[in-house]
Image (cartoon, rainbow, N blue to C red):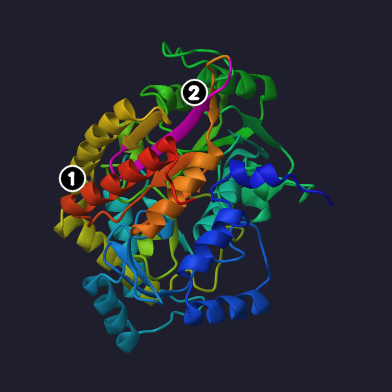
Amino acid sequence: MSHDPLDALRSEGDVNLSPRRKAWSAAHVGPKAAELLARDSRVFLHQSLSTPCLNALADARGASIADTEGRRLLDFHGNNVHQVGFAHPRVVQAIKDQLDELSFCTRRYTCEPAIALAERLAEAAPGDLDRVLFAPGGTSAIGMALKLARIATGRFKFVSMWDSFHGASLDAISVGGEAVFRKGIGPLLPGCEHVPPPEPLRCPFKCGTACNLGCADYVEYVLEKEGDVAAVIGETVRCTPFIPPPDYWKRIRAACDKHGALLILDEIPIGLGRTGKLFACEHYGVVPDMLVLGKGLGGGIFPIAALLAREGLNVATHTALGHYTHEKNPVACAAGLATLDVIRDEGLVAHAAELGRVALDILRGMAARHPLIGDIRGLGLLMGIELVRRDAAGRPVPATDAAEQVMYAALDRGLNFKVTMGNILTLTPALTLARAELEHALHILDTCIGEVESGTSPY
């Protein structure tokens, strides 16, 4: 079966089989890491985006990581799990304390940490999202949401966005829209319809800068024509990031209500304060029927995800939506409770909003100096720099080669981030980041982009 190598350039991850990867590794991977990478390659099934691994880590703490050679890097990647930073002492202590008290909750029983975390999430969530289910990871929580939507509506179809990502399981990639996960895997879940995402720079409706939300109108068109869609599922803000126009989700919410579909918002990577609000949907003034959280909920240590749903969706008593072995794991829930405590007590939501404003000011200044920067975007500490070159007609073309050069040069200087969709430098630091650390990271990017433009980049 043939695969298009460009699929990886249109996905969540960055290229890991390029000559630049080999050049970087030759200069930076020491004997200990090389031995670990060789063992990794021998024992794990190989897969796109993570084989071969870049390097081996020895430490992850606060806003940074360190490799086996002792080199420390600010981590503006973090797999979006480090809202409270890595190894936060309060999360670590909560896990240790819970291990001594109750390490596991077997099926058919409940426990105080699980109930307390569900109560906290229901209390914090917008609107009437006051029913909760836990799962071991975000993909599983998405699966539960899809099942609940079918049960609640009696319908089986879903509308989702091209280029979206909701997880890597078969049901999640069916509603997801990235080729690197979908191609050659079918048949996928039936009834999954895809629509263009709200991306102004790639708008197929040719709205231009005066956006008239043609993409939202098209979602309503599909809902009307299909007539039996169970739910629209989307990422409130795509973590690349692509930030929808202010009225987008209000239009989608109204269309769902009009045509009897539910609205599921996926905030697995961006919830819990990253955007400068505890929940990203608060920026848009909408309450979905279901909201999915994950990644950072376990404090960057323990895997746990949550499905939040309206009271009226408590209709699946006759079946099992998840029934996962670790659904009410007390240690995971203790980590979640400590994470929420840290976010509240350290004012991380407001801190993310303020640092995000600082970052956007700096990024706008960079964009004015660098022709390579085609677009900058940010919401809180979810930021992106899109690199483009111009073709003979002056049209912007994704600068995938330049993005890769910048990434490896930045790694040299102590900054870790990922490249998404081939040409977007995606920046998602810990919410505990200090302003000086933010300014240092953006200075590294400024320098690296300048080197690529001048032809002096080491890569």
- Of residue 452 and residue 107, the one placed in the foreground of this image is 452
**Circle 1 crowding by C-alpha within 10 Å: few under 14, some 14–19, many from 20:** many
Compared across the picture, whether 316 is left or right of 228 comes to: left
Point out residue 316 in the picture as x, y percentages from the top left corner. 56, 53
Structural distance between the alpha carbons of marks 1 and 2: 29 Å
- Give the answer, above or below, for where 442 lies relative to 198: below
**Label for residue 201?**
2
- The residue depicted at 45 percent of the width and 12 percent of the height is 212
Compared across the picture, whether 441 is left or right of 436 comes to: right
Residue at image mark 1: 350
- The residue depicted at 18 percent of the width and 48 percent of the height is 351
Q: Where on the picture, by quarter, is residue 174? A: top right
Point out residue 309 in the picture as x, y percentages from the top left corner. 44, 47
What residue type is disc 2 on?
Answer: Leu
What residue type is disc 1 on?
Answer: Ala
The magenta stretch is 379-392
Compared across the picture, whether 9 is left or right of 425 comes to: right
Work out whether mark 1 precedes mark 2 in sequence or the reverse, and give the earlier one: 2
Do tag 1 and tag 2 residues touch (Cβ < 8 Å)? no
Residue 391 on the magenta segment: yes
Q: Where on the picture, by quarter, is residue 28? A: bottom left
Point out residue 319 in the picture as x, y percentages from the top left corner. 61, 59
- Give the answer, above or below, for where 262 lies relative to 311: above
